[in-house]
Amino acid sequence: MAGVGYSDQIRLIWTQHSTSGLSFWMVLIAFWSWLSYALYGYYNKDRKMFWPNLAGLITISVILASFFIF
């Protein structure tokens, strides 16, 4: 679900060159959530927890970075 929703949001940001309508704090909280679950999976050596959360972390990182780019 995150891959579909976040990729569509990245497309909207790219075409509009704007992050208007997005809450910086909500994206930051989502980033922290993906990061914490990825770290939890990494340190517990749980690949099924780590890899999907790493993918989500990468996509939310693109959205977070877009706040500083646009």
Image (cartoon, rainbow, N blue to C red):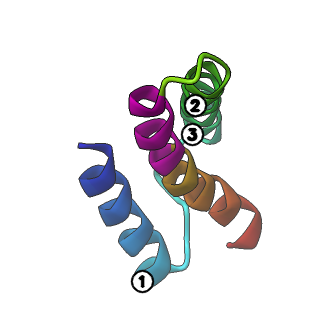
Classify mark 3: helix, strand or loop.
helix
Q: 52 or 62, which lies in front?
A: 52
Magenta: main secondary structure:
helix
Residue 12 in sight in this render = yes
Residue 36 image point, x, y percent: 63, 23
User: Which residue occupies 43% across, 67% down?
Assistant: 10
Magenta stretch, residue numbers: 47-56
Circle 2: residue type: Ala
Indicate which disc, 2 or 1, sits on the residue closer to the N terminus: 1
Tag nearer the camera, 2 or 1: 2
The residue positioned farthest toward the front in the image shown: 45
Estimate the spatial distance between the alpha carbons at disc 2 and disc 1, rounded to whole Å.
30 Å
Residue 59 image point, x, y percent: 50, 56
The residue positioned farthest toward the bottom in the image shown: 15
Q: 4 or 16, which lies in front?
A: 4
The answer to whether mark 2 and mark 1 are in CB contact below 8 A is: no
Circle 1: residue type: Thr
Based on the picture, tell me whether residue 16 belongs to the magenta stretch: no
Estimate the spatial distance between the alpha carbons at disc 3 and disc 2, rounded to whole Å.
16 Å
Q: Residues within 10 Å of mark 3 (few under 14, many from 20)?
A: some
Estimate the spatial distance between the alpha carbons at disc 3 and disc 1, rounded to whole Å.
19 Å
Q: Which mark is residue 15?
A: 1
Residue 41 image point, x, y percent: 55, 24
Q: Which mark is residue 27?
A: 3
Q: Is residue 24 above or below residue 39?
A: below
Residue 12 image point, x, y percent: 38, 71
Q: Quadrant of the N terminus?
A: top left
Q: Which mark is residue 48?
A: none
Indicate which disc, 3 or 1, sits on the residue closer to the N terminus: 1
User: Which residue occupies 56% across, 54% down?
Assistant: 58
Residue that numbered label 2 is attached to: 38
